[in-house]
Image: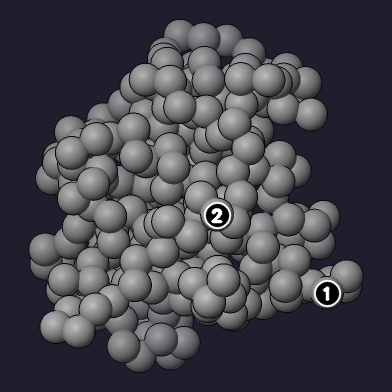
Amino acid sequence: MPEPDWASFGAERSTRWIAVPEAGDDKYSRGVLGVLTGSDRFPGAAVLGVEGASRTGVGMIRYVGPARAADFVLHRRPEIVTVDGRVQAWLVGSGMPPERDEALEQQVRDILGQGVPVVLDAGALDLATAGSGPVVLTPHYGELVPVLALAGVETDRAAVEADPGAWAARAARETGATVLLKGATTFIADASGPRFAVQAGPPWVATAGAGDVLGGVLGALVATHADEVAADPSVLAELAAAAAWLHGEAGRRASGGGPIVALDIAAALPEVLAGLLAA
C-alpha cells in the first residue's frame, strides 16, 4: 500500500486534465506534440507512443525519428507529420538504441535545449538532468537505478522494488525532474513536493509496449497543457498521474478480465475519455 503522504489519484482529478476543443480551435491551438522515439531495431515503440498520443487528444503529432520507424508510423497513422517544426512538448526515448550515434545525440540534445516540456523514457533517461525546460521521467524499476546513479546515488533493482515510492521521491529530488515510476502501483513524485500513487490497471496491462502507449498518453496531456506547465512546472506531476490513471483505466476497459496487447489499451482510450467527460 502507498505511504500516507502519497495522495491517491482517480477519475475526478484525471477528468480535469482532458483538453476539450472548443469552436474556433485548430490543430495548432489544440497542442502539437513532437515525438522522437523508436529505431530501426524497435520501430514498434514509435507506433505505440504515437497511437497513445493520438487517442488521448492532441491537435498534431510531429514524428522525427528514423525512416524505418516513420514508415511504420505513417502506415498506422497517415495523419502524422514527419517534418520538424514548432511543438508544445516532446516525447523522447522509447525504443531508442542504448548507444546513440553522434547525429542522434545532437538531435536529442537540441530538443532538450528548446525549453519546452519533455517526457523522457527508456533510451534517453541518461539525459535526465540535461533539459533546459521541465522534464518528466518515466522509468520502470530497473531503469530508475542508472537514473539515480547519475546523481551519485547507488542502489539496485531489488531495493527499488522493495520501496518504490521512496526511490521515486529520491530520484525527483536528485534530478530536479518529475518522476513517474511504473509498477503495479505507479508512483509520481515532483522535486518540489507533490506525490501521487495510481493503481496502474489489471495485471494484464503488464504487456510489451504498454509503457510506450503510456508515454504517448502523457506526451499528449503535456502538449495540451504546456502553458500551465510553463507557469507552474509542478503541474507535470498532476499530468503524469492523470496519464497513469487513464492508461490503467483503458487497460481495464480493454481487458474485460482477459489478455490484451498494447494497441488494445490505446484503442480503448477514446471511450474512457468520453465516459469521464459525459459523467
| Circle 1/circle 2 CB separation < 8 Å | no
Of the numbered discs 1 and 2, the one sitting upstream in the chain is 2
Q: Residue at x 30, y 81 (%)?
A: 80
Q: Amino acid at mark 1?
A: Gly
Q: State the residue in front, 233 or 205.
A: 233
Q: Residue at x 66, y 58 (%)?
A: 248
What numbered label is drawn on residue 84? none
Q: Residue at x 42, y 56 (%)?
A: 16
Residue 175 in the image, given as x and y percentages of width and height: 38, 21
State left or right for residue 191 relative to residue 83.
Answer: right
**In the rendered image, is residue 211 in sight?**
no
Q: Amino acid at mark 2?
A: Glu
Q: Is residue 36 above or below residue 164?
A: below
The residue labelled by disc 1 is 256
Q: Quadrant of the C terminus?
A: bottom right
For label 2, the crowd category at 10 Å Cα-Cα, with few meaning under 14, some 14 to 19 and many 20 or more, is few
The residue labelled by disc 2 is 12
Q: Is residue 8 above or below residue 44?
A: above
